[in-house]
Amino acid sequence: MTVGGAAGPLAKGRPAPKVLLVDLDDTLYRVHQVADIVRQRIQDYMVQKLGIPEDEVAAKTTELYLAYGTTLAGLVASGYRIDYNDWHEFVHQGALDYDTLLQPDPSLRDILCSIDLPKYILTNANRVHTERVLARLGLSDCFQGLFYFENVMELAAAHGFDVSHGVLCKPNPRIYQLVAEQLGVGLSDVIFFDDSARNLASAHGLGTTTVLVGNDKLSPGVDLAIPTLHDLPAAMPELLDQPGLVHEHHTSHTGAKERHIASLALLAVPVAVPGTPAGSRTSSGGIAVTVPAS
């Protein structure tokens, strides 16, 4: 593993972190078969539902991903009209056997639960896929909230982004700004974990501390590089083994709801309002941030 500078990623002069943002796929876990299936299903969708010639989809998939952050974002920007629910069903939950492909990860759970900071998922995937992955890994209640395709698009629309003609996704810097604003923190208060150096670089340019997962080599815009999140205790020991509300929430079910609400209040993150669906919270702007069931 590689640390960005002798003082490490939390170098003197940087503010103490207040929030961890963690990517989902290929960051919390890495199963090559999942990535292969999703890639193939994207190409199948392009052929079967958009009429793109089969001999063009492989190159077009890569081209759009590199230009727009995700193939979906690139297709929408190119003028294709896509039913987002249909896309995600076809590409993710309709294609993946979660119970076979993913296994619980109790050691990662222990690591996450020992970090006395609020933790949030930030993924380009949709809600159903995100929740299924977390449930299968046994990590659902390790996070105080989830930012995924649907509620990121709601945030974007609420702030003037034209979601009828575009998809807001990583690595667009605007996504990090909106998430930080929603959580009531500055971008310099955030540590962001992702498997994509490109995603990290755009957040780093806004002042965020960045950790590349899945690679032990630094690149521009990356403060720390680690092979897996299991290497976090050795790479950033200052984050772990601190008693506090988040740790207590995961070690005792007694009073868990009250402690969970108290830990959220530390950051002035969204609180529940009447009429909000169970499992979600909203800010004063009305955008739901899903809170996994305890």
Image (cartoon, rainbow, N blue to C red):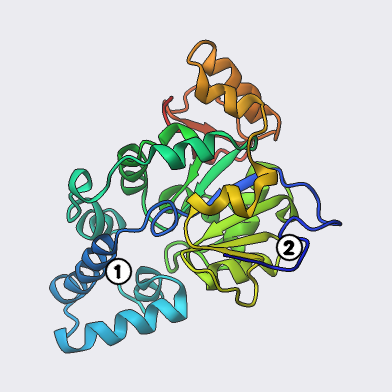
Percent from the top left, x then y, of residue 237?
Answer: 66, 46
Q: 115 and 221: which one is in front?
A: 115
Q: 209 and 291: which one is in front?
A: 209
Say what secondary structure mark 1 lies in.
loop
Position of residue 59 in the picture relative to residue 222 (left or right): left
Judge whether residue 225 can be spotted in this image: yes
Query: How far is disc 2 from disc 1 in space, using C-alphas?
Result: 35 Å
Percent from the top left, x then y, of residue 95?
Answer: 17, 56
Residue count near mark 2 (Cα–Cα under 10 Å), binned few <14, some 14–19, many ≥20: some
Q: Residue furthest right?
A: 13
On the rendered image, what quadrant is the N terminus found in?
A: bottom right
- 2 and 1 marks in contact (CB < 8 Å): no
Q: Which residue lies at the image location 28% right of the left edge and 53% below the top edge?
A: 85
Q: Which mark is residue 207?
A: 2
Snapshot quadrant of residue 38? bottom left
Percent from the top left, x then y, of residue 53?
Answer: 16, 86
Q: Which residue lies at the image location 45% right of the left edge and 42% below the top edge?
A: 108
Q: Which residue lies at the image location 33% right of the left edge and 37% below the top edge?
A: 135
Snapshot quadrant of residue 220? bottom right
Q: Residue furthest front?
A: 234
Q: 4 and 99: which one is in front?
A: 4
On the rendered image, what quadrant is the C terminus found in?
A: top left
Position of residue 109 in the picture relative to residue 20 (left or right): left
Type of amino acid under label 1: Arg
Type of amino acid under label 2: Gly
Position of residue 198 in the picture relative to residue 79 (left or right): right
Say what secondary structure mark 2 lies in.
loop
Q: 122 and 52: which one is in front?
A: 122
Q: Which residue lies at the image location 61% right of the left edge and 63% below the top edge?
A: 174
Depicted 281 relative to depicted 232: above or below: above
Q: Which residue is mark 1?
A: 81
